[in-house]
Image: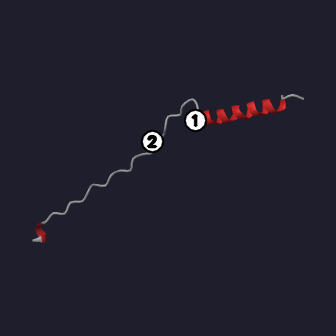
Amino acid sequence: MSDNVIKFRRPEKQPEPPVKKPRGPMPSWAPFALLVLLAIVIYAFTQFSGPN
């Protein structure tokens, strides 16, 4: 009886090509880097321009 059973195989999927994200005007880490840079500039300004 098992000779009459047709065994089906799933067709092999083609691998999807990697999707490249469209490059925006600036990377996603840039706002955080700007905030850190601004904090360093403010800290340095307050340290070096304090009362003498």
State whether residue 21 is above or below residue 8: above
Q: Name the residue nearer the viewer: 43 or 31.
A: 43
List x then y, in percent, for residue 47.
81, 33
Residue at 26%, 56% (x, y): give it.
10
Q: Is residue 2 above or below residue 39?
A: below
The amino acid marked with disc number 1 is Pro
- Mark earlier in primary sequence (2, 1): 2
Circle 1 packing at 10 Å, graded few (<14), some (14-19), many (20+), is few
Q: Amino acid at mark 2?
A: Val
Q: Residue at x 54, y 31 (%)?
A: 24
Of 7 and 36, nearer the camera is: 36
Q: How many marks?
A: 2
Q: Is residue 18 left or right of residue 1?
A: right
Percent from the top left, x then y, of residue 6?
A: 15, 63
- Tell me the distance, in whole angstroms, between the alpha carbons under discs 2 and 1: 17 Å
Report whether 14 appears left or right of 42: left
Taking the spot 27% from the left edge, 55% from the top edge, the residue there is 11
**Element at label 2:** loop
Q: Position of residue 31 (x, y in %)?
A: 61, 33
- Reading the image, the residue beneath label 1 is 27
Badge number at residue 19: 2
Q: 24 left or right of 1?
A: right
